[in-house]
């Protein structure tokens, strides 16, 4: 069963840093963002809840 994400928040600092990345890295990140939005618990991603100041938010990473 999919766990879609309805709202994703990114900061202006993130957006600025993202634009500075090489195009092929931007493409990989965009692909992974689509996986996350479609199913937050996609097995290709290591999804986890954040703690502390960011409690209530989720993050993910993928082994390279």
Image: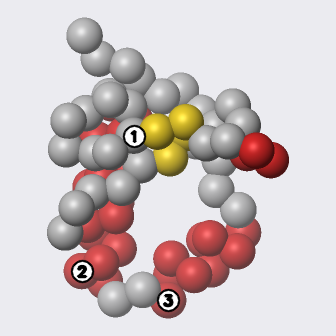
Horizontal relation, residue 43 to residue 47: left or right: left
Residue 34 in sight: no
From the top left corner, tell me how far across and down residue 34 is, in percent: 33, 44
Residue drawn 53% across the image and 26% down it: 6
For disc 3, the neighbor class at 10 Å (few under 14, some 14 to 19, many from 20) is few
Residue drawn 48% across the image and 28% down it: 5
Q: Quadrant of residue 46?
A: top left
Q: Quadrant of residue 22?
A: bottom left
Horizontal relation, residue 51 to residue 28: left or right: right
How far is the residue under mark 2 from the one under mark 3? 11 Å
Residue 5 in sight: yes
> Regarding mark 2 in the picture, which secondary structure is present there?
helix
The tag earlier along the polypeptide, 1 or 2, is: 2
Horizontal relation, residue 48 to residue 2: left or right: right
How far is the residue under mark 1 from the one under mark 3? 25 Å
Question: Do callouts 2 and 3 mark residues in contact (Cβ within 8 Å)?
Answer: no
> Regarding mark 1 in the picture, which secondary structure is present there?
loop
Q: Nearer the viewer, residue 38 or 54?
A: 54
Question: Do callouts 1 and 3 mark residues in contact (Cβ within 8 Å)?
Answer: no
The tag earlier along the polypeptide, 1 or 3, is: 3
**Mark identifier at residue 20:** 3
From the top left corner, tell me how far across and down residue 62 is, in percent: 27, 57
**Mark identifier at residue 47:** 1
Look at mark 2 in the image and give the residue it sits on. 24
> Regarding mark 3 in the picture, which secondary structure is present there?
helix
Q: Nearer the viewer, mark 1 or mark 2?
A: 1
Residue 62 position (above or below residue 17): above
From the top left corner, tell me how far across and down residue 10 is, in percent: 64, 56
Quadrant location, the C terminus = bottom left
């Amino acid at each position: 069963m999919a766990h879609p994400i309805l709202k994703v928040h990114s900061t202006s600092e993130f957006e600025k840093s993202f634009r500075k990345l090489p195009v092929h890295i931007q493409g990989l990140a965009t692909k992974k963002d689509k996986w996350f939005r479609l199913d937050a618990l996609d097995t290709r991603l290591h999804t986890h809840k954040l703690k502390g100041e960011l409690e209530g938010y989720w993050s993910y990473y993928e082994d390279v």
